[in-house]
């Protein structure tokens, strides 16, 4: 329900002097224009109980008033952390307005926390002893209110020696998690790492530091940084991955520099025909391998950019290697290379086609790169599973393979039916006819 | 307009009305014409509470998205920021405020509405940037539980699972507890609280403490809910990972994903194999093929996590093998995400040397071979034969009670417990003959549409005895859930 303008003026002015109550309308304290004076006079009452000279005075605009220039104390909590939710749905909870007059310097930690939860002004400076501070922290944690816990932690962080703070938090899980979250949010990386080291959460330290590499855009600096990460206390497996990451980036920098040079020199055919679309820097390993199989396939193992060098350095399994090389050579329509990849020679010198990834996958990749039917056909023929073989052969019009397969299956009906799929008068049709006429075959149907 | 909210057993309109009232009050406080600068994330949740027409009624003339740079010129008296209490958003707000042309006339007043809570940290941050004083009204809008449907409430807190299970941060649990207190203020004290899981235990403790600290909150409203069941998401990690097969679940999963139907069915086959315990202990060919073909990483992660959960963790060799393949194909930086998944219990080493999952599956009858999707008689229809563990637990709680599954409960993570809350005399619920109990099931860490469908199925069963209202920190599917656990790999804009 909106108020009429005239009422508004009255409303703002009349509530000028109200202080801290539950009613959320009383958050006028944060209305700078009208309330500044009133609030300052009010603050005198509030500060009355505090003899502490260390108290920092902060004006409502946020600037520290007076000589000290420390981090603002959480007296800014007095900017009413009012709990509007509770107020709306549990009206019985409204406290009498008189309560704000009730200032005492003897609030126990428990009471202090309660007041903070209700958004009232509280100075924590008076809790000087370690014992008091810890009770305060425990009370805050028990109350579950994140803002209060944060406020207390900020206070402890400022007034306790680091070792003591760490030691005490070690046995207070909730407060500890809260502080870690807080440090992460505010980006206090150094303190966070110190804390984690203290807690012997060494792997977390390592990962947390490693994560920072994402913020380094300059490749050289990133490489240096990754190098520094290698000695960190990762788990054994993770260490090898980090090592690989560094090595990979190191290689990529060299390859990138070389290839950029080759490209601009304009002498290399492959780079002229297929100009690079992107830099190889920071790409994953497999992508780098693909790149290397594309642009540097024939290079000897000794160079950093050769595929075989990558395979060896990063212990890339055969399956992955063949797959990637296949994809690269197929893209370049280098069918001879494809053939060589899939041919192995045994000690007797006999060659045989072998695919660590299954020939149906080979066919898929070749087909995606528009391999001519003659090339495709050769590998469709090698697909082990008959049904798959027929499916692929039919799909990609590898007529010879279809014909051969039906012949081997002795399936006269299917073979006859397939005649309509081939061109009238073609060699394939003749082939089918001659097979159908072969009296030696014992057809099953 | 609120018809869908009152359609269930519990009329959730009152909850939404309360939310609207609070919003109106704040808008009126910032008297005069206004422009709202939105934290994009909030537009969804707010849309469930109020339409633009309501905002217009309170003189909202313009709405823009929060982003760095200068605010648009709009000739309004007030500029209000609607934001979550996040430091990176405070940086953007600072930028907006500092670029404001102080010479312009008339000057615009700035305000902030923090959703769902003010944050000391944020206000300190603004103070340190020197802009805190620029804001006249700084308040919070306690959008804890938002009614999404007649039987469904959500906190829309995407990071809840990560915070609770990865960072042991209880902030979302605190909000859950507050949301529940609000609910009880409107619908009466809930006499019985059951729970399973660490987070469930924390929420129950918070509720009890909150009740104790505000003794006046004992109200005279006749209790609508009989039981509250608090469930940790990590009690059932499997359900969100599997592809949902109810209509809404499928739409939720498929939207935006370009699978071929062939691949979709291949994927489903592998999932179902894992869920029925087939070959969960070795590296899976289909998964390896997908990695080799560089399918979207999230799809891979879902599958390997599913395998891990169905095997109570993977053997060292298998885990190392998957990790290596993933890092080599997608980049080493994903070591951070893999670490998160491990911490969350989704992709981990099998420590105990034995796989508990088959026992749990058999005892709770999670896998039903004779499922009839046309005429289902069991909740397993939602995953074509697999009954969500979480819903099975709810079902068994109602009848015959958890005493009968003590052994299995012990195999699941976290404590299980029961609490009773005192009702003032005269308010003891006397159920009419044949009247159903009403149970509020609260999923801490997210709930899927399939689980919602399963609970609705139970509600509709004749002689079922219980009707369910569902609450959650967030509505999730496997993809959005895994995404929330992935490390943000792009550097921050500032």
Image: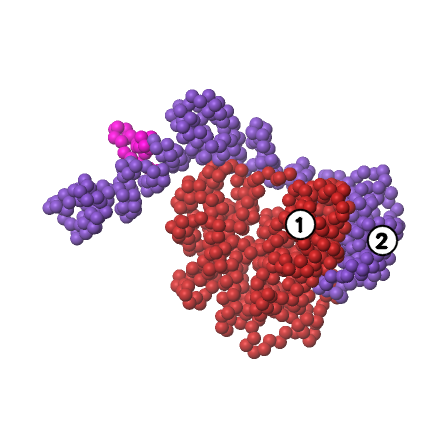
Chain colours: A purple, B red
Chain designation of label 2 = A
Determine whether A41 is above or below B397 in the image: above
Q: CA distance from mark 2 to mark 1?
A: 44 Å
Is B136 positioned to the left or the right of B420 in the image?
right
Determine whether A308 is above or below A122 in the image: above
Q: SS at mark 2?
A: loop
Q: Is residue A194 visible?
A: no
- Taking the spot 36% from the left edge, 34% from the top edge, the residue there is A330
Is A389 positioned to the left or the right of A295 in the image?
left
Numbered label attached to residue A106? 2
For this rendering, which residue is in front, A371 or A272?
A272
Query: Does residue B395 show up magenta in the picture?
Result: no
- Taking the spot 57% from the left edge, 42% from the top edge, the residue there is B488
Determine whether B415 is above or below B93 in the image: below
- Taking the spot 38% from the left edge, 25% from the top edge, the residue there is A298
Q: Which residue is mark 1?
A: B37
- Taking the spot 83% from the left edge, 61% from the top edge, the residue there is A97
Query: Does residue A354 show up magenta in the picture?
Result: yes
Rendered location of residue B387, percent (x, y) = 47, 60
Q: Residue furthest bottom?
A: B433
Part of the protein shown in magenta: A335-357
Chain designation of label 1 = B
Rendered location of residue B141, percent (x, y) = 69, 56
Look at discs 2 and 1 and give the one toward the viewer.
Answer: 1
Numbered label attached to residue A371? none
Rendered location of residue B120, percent (x, y) = 73, 48
């Amino acid at each position: 329900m909106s108020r009429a303008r005239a009422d508004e003026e009255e409303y703002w002015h009349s509530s000028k002097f109200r202080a801290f109550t539950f009613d959320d309308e009383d958050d006028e304290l944060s209305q700078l224009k009208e309330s500044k004076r009133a609030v300052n006079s009010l603050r005198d009452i509030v500060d009355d109980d505090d003899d502490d000279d260390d108290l920092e005075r902060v004006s409502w605009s946020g600037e520290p008033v007076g000589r000290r220039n420390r981090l603002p104390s959480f007296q800014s909590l007095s900017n009413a952390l009012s709990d509007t939710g509770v107020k709306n749905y549990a009206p019985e909870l409204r406290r009498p307005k008189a309560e704000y007059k009730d200032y005492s310097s003897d609030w126990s930690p428990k009471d202090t926390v309660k007041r903070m939860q209700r958004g009232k002004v509280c100075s924590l400076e008076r809790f000087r002893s370690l014992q008091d501070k810890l009770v305060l922290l425990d009370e805050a944690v028990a109350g579950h209110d994140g803002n209060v816990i944060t406020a207390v932690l900020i206070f402890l962080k400022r007034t306790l020696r680091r070792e003591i703070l760490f030691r005490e938090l070690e046995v207070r899980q909730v407060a500890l998690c809260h502080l870690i979250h807080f440090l992460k949010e505010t980006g206090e990386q150094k303190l966070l790492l110190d804390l984690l080291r203290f807690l012997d959460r060494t792997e977390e330290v390592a990962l947390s530091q490693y994560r920072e590499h994402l913020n380094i855009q300059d490749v050289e600096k990133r490489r240096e940084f990754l190098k520094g990460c290698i000695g960190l206390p990762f788990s054994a497996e993770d260490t090898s991955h980090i090592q690989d990451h560094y090595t990979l980036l190191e290689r990529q920098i060299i390859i990138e520099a070389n290839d950029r040079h080759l490209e601009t020199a304009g002498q290399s055919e492959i780079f002229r025909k297929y100009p690079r679309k992107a830099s190889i820097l920071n790409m994953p390993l497999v992508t780098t391998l693909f790149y290397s199989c594309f642009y540097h396939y024939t290079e000897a193992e000794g160079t950093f950019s050769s595929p075989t060098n990558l395979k060896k350095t990063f212990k890339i399994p055969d399956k992955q290697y063949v797959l990637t090389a296949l994809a690269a050579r197929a893209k370049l329509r280098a069918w001879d290379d494809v053939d060589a990849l899939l041919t192995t020679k045994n000690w007797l010198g006999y060659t045989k086609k072998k695919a660590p990834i299954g020939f149906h996958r080979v066919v898929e990749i070749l087909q995606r790169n528009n391999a001519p039917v003659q090339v495709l056909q050769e590998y469709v023929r090698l697909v082990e599973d008959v049904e798959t073989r027929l499916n692929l052969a039919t799909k990609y019009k590898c007529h010879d393979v279809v014909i051969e397969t039906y012949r081997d299956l002795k399936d006269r009906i299917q073979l006859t039916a397939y005649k309509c799929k081939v061109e009238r008068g073609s060699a394939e049709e003749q082939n089918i006819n001659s097979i159908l006429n072969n009296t030696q075959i014992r057809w099953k149907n | 307009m609120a018809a869908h909210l009152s359609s269930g057993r519990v009329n959730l309109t009152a909850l939404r009305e309360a939310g609207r009232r609070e919003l109106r009050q704040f808008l009126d406080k910032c008297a005069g014409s206004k422009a709202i600068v939105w934290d994009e994330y909030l537009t969804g949740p707010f849309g469930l509470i109020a339409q633009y027409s309501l905002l217009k009624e309170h003189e909202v003339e313009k709405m823009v998205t929060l982003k760095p740079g200068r605010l648009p010129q709009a000739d309004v008296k007030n500029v209000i920021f609607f934001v979550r209490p996040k430091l990176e958003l405070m940086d953007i707000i600072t930028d907006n405020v500092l670029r404001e042309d102080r010479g312009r006339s008339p000057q615009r007043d700035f305000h902030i509405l923090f959703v769902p809570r003010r944050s000391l940290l944020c206000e300190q941050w603004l103070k340190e940037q020197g802009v805190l004083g620029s804001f006249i009204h700084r308040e919070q809008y306690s959008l804890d539980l938002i009614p999404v449907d007649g039987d469904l409430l959500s906190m829309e807190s995407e990071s809840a699972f990560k915070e609770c299970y990865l960072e042991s941060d209880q902030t979302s649990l605190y909000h859950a507890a507050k949301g529940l207190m609000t609910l009880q203020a409107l619908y009466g004290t809930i006499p019985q609280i059951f729970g399973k899981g660490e987070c469930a235990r924390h929420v129950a403790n918070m509720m009890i403490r909150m009740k104790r600290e505000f003794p006046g909150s004992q109200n005279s409203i006749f209790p609508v809910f009989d039981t509250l069941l608090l469930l940790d998401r990590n009690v059932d990690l499997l359900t969100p990972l599997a592809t949902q097969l109810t209509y809404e679940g499928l739409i939720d999963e498929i939207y935006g994903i370009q699978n071929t139907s062939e691949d979709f069915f291949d994927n489903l086959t592998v999932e179902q194999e894992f869920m029925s315990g087939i070959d969960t202990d070795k590296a899976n060919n289909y998964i390896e093929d997908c990695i080799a073909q560089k399918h979207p990483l999230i799809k891979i992660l879902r599958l390997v996590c599913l395998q891990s959960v169905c095997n109570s963790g993977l053997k060292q060799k298998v885990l190392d093998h998957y990790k290596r393949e993933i890092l080599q194909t997608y980049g080493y930086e994903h070591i951070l995400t893999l670490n998160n998944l491990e911490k969350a219990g989704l992709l981990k080493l099998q420590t105990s040397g034995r796989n508990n999952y088959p026992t749990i599956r058999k005892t709770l009858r999670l896998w039903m071979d004779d499922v009839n999707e046309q005429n289902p008689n069991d909740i397993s229809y939602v995953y074509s034969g697999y009954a969500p563990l979480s819903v099975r637990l709810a079902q068994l709680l109602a009848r015959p009670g958890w005493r009968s599954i003590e052994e299995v409960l012990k195999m699941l993570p976290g404590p299980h417990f029961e609490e009773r809350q005192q009702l003032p005399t005269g308010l003891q619920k006397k159920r009419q003959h044949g009247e159903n109990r009403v149970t509020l099931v609260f999923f801490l860490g997210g709930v899927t549409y399939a689980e919602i469908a399963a609970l609705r199925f139970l509600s509709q069963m004749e002689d079922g005895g219980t009707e369910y209202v569902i609450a959650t920190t967030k509505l999730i599917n496997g993809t959005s859930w895994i995404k929330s656990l992935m490390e943000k790999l792009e550097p921050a804009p500032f």
